[in-house]
Amino acid sequence: MRLREHPCWPPQWNPIHGGAAKLPDNEAGVLENAKLSIVNDSILFLSMSYGGDHYVAELSFDDSRFCQRVFDLLGQHYSSGIKAIGDLEIS
């Protein structure tokens, strides 16, 4: 996933239950959910699962309209692999 020529994927995943879980390799895992921030309309929060553990990440954008487009796109890809989502083109 890229904005112009700048990669914005994969996000930095963090385990929900502290540091005990093994962090997934790059784009492993399955997208569970995406939420728009209620504080900043240029930030998305993502959740995914991998190996029985759950992770969260934040994506920040310079453009709130682009953030909304990414949010809408991700909503169509819940239960999709993180790698497959990263291969999507957004223009």
Image: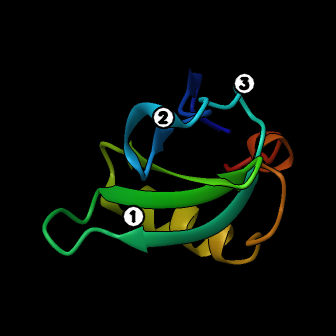
Among the two numbered marks 1 and 2 on one chain, the one whose residue lies closer to the N terminus: 2
Among the two numbered marks 2 and 3 on one chain, the one whose residue lies closer to the N terminus: 2
On the image, numbered disc 2 is attached to which residue? 20
Q: Looking at the image, can residue 88 be seen?
A: yes
Could you tell me how far apart the alpha carbons at marks 1 and 3 are, in whole angstroms?
30 Å
Front one among 25 and 72: 25
Among the two numbered marks 1 and 3 on one chain, the one whose residue lies closer to the N terminus: 3
Mark 1 and mark 3 in contact? Answer it, CB < 8 Å. no
Other residues around mark 3 within 10 Å, as few (<14) / some (14–19) / many (≥20): few
Q: Which residue is depicted at the point 77% across and 47% down? A: 51
Could you tell me how far apart the alpha carbons at marks 1 and 2 are, in whole angstroms?
36 Å
Q: Is residue 77 above or below residue 43?
A: below
List the single residue furthest toward the front: 20
Q: Position of residue 27 (x, y in %)?
A: 74, 34
Mark 3, secondary structure of its residue? loop
Q: Nearer the viewer, mark 1 or mark 3?
A: 3
- Image quadrant where one finds the N terminus: top right
In the image, taking residue 83 as reference, residue 15 lies left or right, namely left
Front one among 15 and 35: 15
